Amino acid sequence: MMSDDGEQLLVVYDDHSDQRSMSLDETSSTEESPDETKVLLETTDDAIPYIGQRFATHDHAYEFYSEFAKRCGFSIRRHRTEGKDGVGKGLTRRYFVCHRAGNTPVKTLSENKPQRNRKSSRCGCQAYMRISKTTELGAPEWRVTGFSNHHNHELLEPNQVRFLPAYRTISDTDKNRILMFAKTGISVQQMMRLLELEKCVEPGYLPFTEKDVRNLLQSFRKVDLEDESIDLLRMCRNIKDKDHNFQFEYKLDSNNRLENIAWSYASSVQLYEIFGDAVVFDTTHRLNAFDMPLGIWVGMNNYGMPCFFGCALLREENVKSYSWALKAFLGFMNGKVPQTILTDQTLCVREAISMEMPSAKHAYCIWLIVAKFPSWFNAVLGERYNEWKGEFYRLYNMESIEDFEMGWRDMVNSFGLHTNRHISTLFASRNLWALPYLRSHFFAGMTTTAHSKAINAFIQRFLSAQTRLAHFIEQVAVAVDFKDQAGEQQTMQQNLQNICLKTGAPMESHAASVLTPFAFSKLQEQLVLAAHYASFQLEDGFLVRHHTKIEGMLFEYSPQEIAFRFQKGRNSKVDGLRNQSNRVYAPALEAHKHISKAPSDHFE
């Protein structure tokens, strides 16, 4: 058939000997349908469905029509089946329709059930293909008895049609690869890129999308938590059988279901004995697949690398659960309480620490506080947000409490934050996060941004491995083993590297022979800065002066202050001469430059 402008149009073909009702608009709709349009078909004649076309099975007919639809720019779905007496048994007629056929039914709103406000693509399209079952010469087959390619909507371009759900499939092979990738903890984006490289396809041209992969992973996460708990306990027992130094503890509720579980590895216990003076207890993460809070104990070794101490999965976020976790952790570590412990601002954690670790100095992780600043202050301060943040960091790093509190008042006045509740809360808890209040305690450098990023990156290595609980504990073990191997590599490199001395001081030479490169670099920084100070010996000690040309100021350190600052190095066996800021040890080192070796307890 020809249109008025001479173009070929596809019209409706129907076998009148096999007429049945073809009402696709069986339900009402609240959507507007686009204007009805006739669609040009640009394809070869043998690829177009036609009346009388025969197929061995109805599945073959569906596959043929689906391929035709994909070339045209739409997809199809199975619509209705019919039976007919006298012609075989069971199914005798099928309708395949455009994916936009029919109309959206009106949903009845229910106050008790949440409603998903999903838009429908259905617009009453009448395009279809009908096949009927016939029996000739004793062999059943399916024949096309009706076909229309009239669409009342625009058809999709080839680069668009591939995104229709009907053409997005994940093969069994790809499913297995994706589930294997999930165990490693890599992101969905990384999974997609790996599969693209393996299949040599351009980015974005896999037969499925990131959303499909996420849905696949989510379907595997919908498992019975009770069965998962049994598998997790079985795995812990198997690990314990192979490694008697593996530690785990669990608690069952009154219904004999898993309530809490904590575990630690043999290498973690050994690391804690050496580097357990300062610990981070991070409780800000969850296993979303099981809606379980996660607690992770992490420290810092003398190579400046995070080290894993232990892990706990809890059912509830309350004082009782956190108290249980802390007791289990101390049990793993032979009762050794850390000198300092860093957490987020959760009050339940604070109360649990005061009960189970009363001798430990509790402080807040500054990076967990700073992470909340955009939501707290961005809208309030607007363009002055970055300026305020810079002032906050300046106050945070101050030396004296008096200067901090005076500067805080000035900051509040300058930025008009008198009534801001977050500012009030921060100031009320300042002794738990501000460095002027914490300088007499050892935190292994974990109050700095660089170390906080390293700790967070370490935790993220296993957080995404949440398909199964058993997979999660496997990935934690892999991350711990990876860090152990990294430590061994650092030791090897230390034995190969030549140390570059900068000051020629006897203490520098001694430190180079006993400290790791990371710890030595921290001490060397202070030895270099010590040259900026002048010391004068007094009867009761030394007077140290520091003149800064930029500020035009003169700082003097009393004999008592010098003695105190040098003594602070004895707070940890990890690395006594690391501390919170560069100005801490330079004056003390200048006053004690005559010492050829620092006391041994600084370098244990």
Image (cartoon, rainbow, N blue to C red):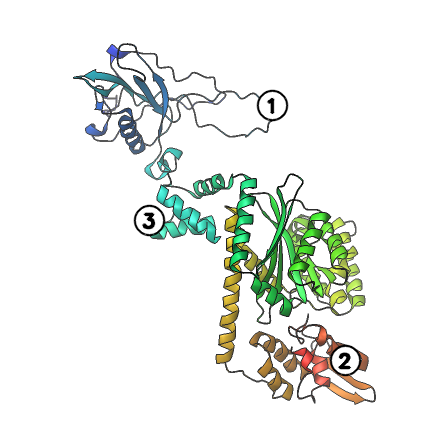
- As rendered, which of 329 and 424 lies closer to the eye? 329
Three-letter code, disc 2? Ile
* Distance between the alpha carbons at the discs numbered 2 and 3: 66 Å
Which residue is denoted by mark 3 in the rendering? Answer: 201
Rendered view: 473 above or below 225: below
Image coordinates of residue 9 in percent, x first then y, are: 26, 23
Q: Residue at x 59, y 63 (%)?
A: 268
Quarter residue 165 falls in: top left
Identify the secondary structure beneath mark 2.
helix
- Of mark 3 and mark 1, the one earlier in the sequence is 1
Crowd band around label 1 with a 10 angstrom C-alpha radius: few (<14), some (14–19), many (20+): few
**Drawn side of residue 49 relative to residue 267, left or right:** left
Q: What residue appears at the point 57 percent right and 76 percent down from the top-left corner? A: 516
Amino acid type indicated by mark 3: Val
Q: Where is mark 1, residue-wise?
A: 110
Residue 387 can be seen, yes or no: no
Rate crowding at label 3 as few (under 14), some (14 to 19) or many (20 or more) other CA atoms within 10 Å.
few
Residue 287, percent from left and from top: 57, 47
Residue 84 lies in what quarter of the image? top left
Q: Amino acid at mark 1?
A: Ser
Please, is residue 2 above or below residue 260 in the view? Answer: above
For residue 156, side relative to residue 137 (left or right):
right
Q: Earlier in the sequence, mark 1 or mark 2?
A: 1
